[in-house]
Amino acid sequence: MEINKRTILWIVFAVSLVILWNNWMVTNGRQSMFSPTPPAKVAQAPANTTSTTGVPAAGALPGALPGAAAPGTVPGQPAAPVRAERITVTTDVVKAEIDTAGGVIRRLELLKYPDHFDKKKNQVLFDISGNNTYLGQTGLIGSTAAGVLPNHNTPFVARPGLRTLDGGNTVQVVLDAEQGGVKLTKTLTFKRNDYVIDVRHDVTNLTAAPVQPSLYLQLQHDGNAPPGDSWFTPSFTGPTLWTPGEKYQKLTFENIEKGKAEHATKANGGWVAISQHFFVSAFIPAENAAREIFTKKLATNLYAIGTVQPLGLVAPGATVSNSARLYSGPQDEKRLETITPGLELVKDYGMFAIIAKPLFWIIDQIHQLLGNWGWTIIAFTILIKLAFFPLSAAGYRSMAKMRVVTPKMQAIRERYKADPVKMQQATMELYKSEKINPLGGCLPILVQMPVFLALYYVLQASVEMRGAPWIGWIQDLTQPDPWFILPVLYAASMYITAKLNPQPADPMQAKMMLFMPLAFSVMFIFFPSGLVLYWVVNNLVSIAQQYVITKRYEVKK
């Protein structure tokens, strides 16, 4: 039996070392041992050339959209280089770079959110760099006798205009393209203090025959794991969507790769998005208009989600217009709720959403009073501990009883150490005579676990706390403690808690109980400091409650 206990101890120690080493590698920008190496990505088109992937061909069905090429090229082959202009639009919250080759937002910076790793840089969403691709693309499906209609490979021409707010509230970029006898005008409208970009498409038929185009809105993203993501603190990056019928759906690049991504394919409302930790980009088509929804593998390690919306029959010389929106910004729950139904669900609380959402509402109310997210976490933790005090007190009283009878239990073990059956019978008799429930200390913890887990998701998912300081050395509650003070405090509080609990009679079990605080504190080195702060305060309040109840019980005895 001793060998088994020692083996368990060494297994726990070994696992802790592996996790420590893995997180050190991830923190230093190396590949996690627990995630596969991403497949090599196809080379991106160089600057001033058009993209070659992802445009639906005429008559193609959603979910099986082959690539369409720029005019004069063979579908699926690289498009010929075109002279492109890069237009930079700056508002108070975003800086966008628009490429006239396709009329695509090639890069989008969030000016109020610093980069996770380099605080001197801004958080970037849309971008093409190295093995990473993240773009939003729009265009037309269809063709005439003169060729295919304008798409995101087509050269556009930008009309002159302001590129910054300059005291105003909006900035518009108007792009024109003519292809296949059809003129497409894209109008992108950026607004003050708004991450929503209005995207209008005006389609004019310049031919002598009617045309029947469809408009596609497409987000494409590589399948690479997010930087800094690890097995122990994972985050989700992938396609999401919401429809009035099917509601919120969350997909994975892996299932798209395998052709197993099941989702709604037709709707009259809703949105499609690429979600990631703290941020989201979502195309929101016009409401009450039929559209088809597709997901697609575009190339090696490159995937897309989008919609196709018929624009109806356009007579010669006529113009049809379509208005959509592109949200690209933080997963700010209050902001997302005002944009379109269901968009706030991208703030992923996991399976505990029904508990996590009201918890965040309470936390937000406390924050409005205190104005500091660190003190908010502390105040909320104390309130939670007070709310669950009756349950906790029952557990502490049970453990106090166990502490009082520990000498008797040790005497029983010594007396019947050669007869395990009699030892078990004598122990149960002792529990019965002392009115002790051996599981009494576990039940209150089990009841509280759903709340604790929901709170974990709240703290892990809330962009409101990203970059939020507490005091002194804690300048970002979503980042690990740079000086390891909170993990050390956690280990100390766990050690005190272990001393307050009944001590196991088996020396090896006692050693394991003392080792666990060290193992957890090592893992907490890589946890967001806001989460560790919660557990430190939780343990300190538990120690105070348990000490008072234990002393009261011992005095009565």
Image: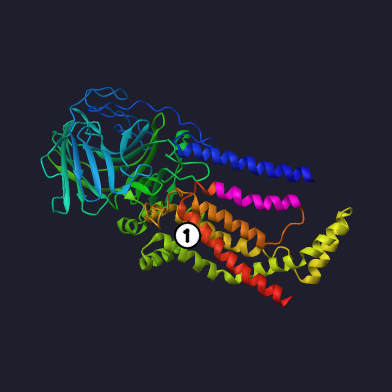
- Which residue in the structure is indicated by mark 1? 356
For mark 1, does the 10 Å Cα neighbourhood hold few (<14), some (14 to 19), or many (20 or more) residues? Answer: many
Occupied quadrant, residue 298: top left
Q: Can you name the residue that lies furthest to the bottom here?
A: 556
Instruction: Say above or below: 244 vs 63.
Output: below
Where residue 462 sits: x, y (%)? 41, 55
Q: Secondary structure at mark 1?
A: helix
Instruction: Say above or below: 64 vs 330.
Output: above
Give 269 or 256, whichever is nearer the viewer: 256
Where residue 268 sits: x, y (%)? 33, 51
The secondary structure that dominates the magenta segment is helix
The answer to whether one can see residue 201 in this image is no
The answer to whether one can see residue 180 in this image is yes
Residue type at numbered disc 1: Ala
Q: Which residues are magenta?
A: 507-522
Instruction: Say above or below: 149 vs 2.
Output: above
Give 321 or 538, whichever is nearer the viewer: 538
Where residue 522 sits: x, y (%)? 56, 46
